[in-house]
Image (cartoon, helix red, strand yellow):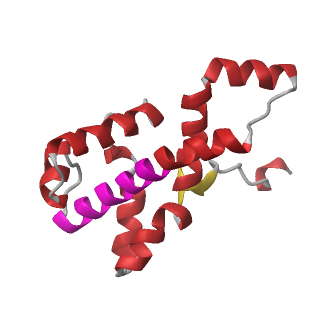
Amino acid sequence: MTDNVRKPSAKRDSLLAHCLVRAVIAAEGREKLEEQLAAGDLQVTAWTGAKATPKASRVATFIVLWAKAMHDERLEEFSITEYQRYWRESERQAYRLQREFRELWPEFDTPNDLAPQIVSHLAAKKATKREIASLPMTLQVRA
């Protein structure tokens, strides 16, 4: 009987939502939030979310732009130097974005592990600039 039960899939949410949650955790501190959760009084104020949103937006955009460049260059992996060259970004700005990415996604050095989900989406359809700009808010990813 239990053979027919579906296995739960990994949580999928928009890339921006994943980045926003990670930005709040980075701003407030994981330990503090876990203590509040255990005590049953976890509260994330609108102000905390508002403070975390710009960084979350920048990181989500960085991930999408990284994937777009990988897709256009037909590469399986990308480096920060290739990203900088492709987007004609200054070296300081490219490394600043990478630092913010690593703050929110400490398990990764670069977006190379997240990008294939976006690259496959880009490969499936010819996305316009407007569609690419909305990807951080609309594209569902597995973290």
Give yes or no for residue 66 being in the magenta stretch. yes
Q: How many marks?
A: 0
The quarter holding residue 29 reads top right
Return the residue nearer the eye: 16 or 28.
28
Measuring from the top left, give residue 75's x and y in whole percent: 19, 57
Residue at the location (32% across, 43% down)? 97
Q: Going 48% across and 61% down the picture, which residue do you hit?
A: 136
Residue 56: give x, y in percent of width and height: 50, 47
Q: Where is residue 113 drawn, in percent x and y?
A: 36, 45
Q: Is the magenta stretch mostly helix, strand or loop?
A: helix
Up-down relation of residue 124 to residue 86 (above or below) = below
Q: Is residue 126 left or right of residue 83?
A: right
**Residue that appears at 55% across and 67% down:** 138
Residue positioned 42% across, 47% down in the render? 59
Q: In this view, does 140 lie above or below 105?
A: below
Residue 97 belongs to magenta span: no
Using the rendered view, name the quadrant where residue 6 is placed: bottom right
Residue 96: % across, % down: 29, 38
- The residue range painted magenta reads 57-73
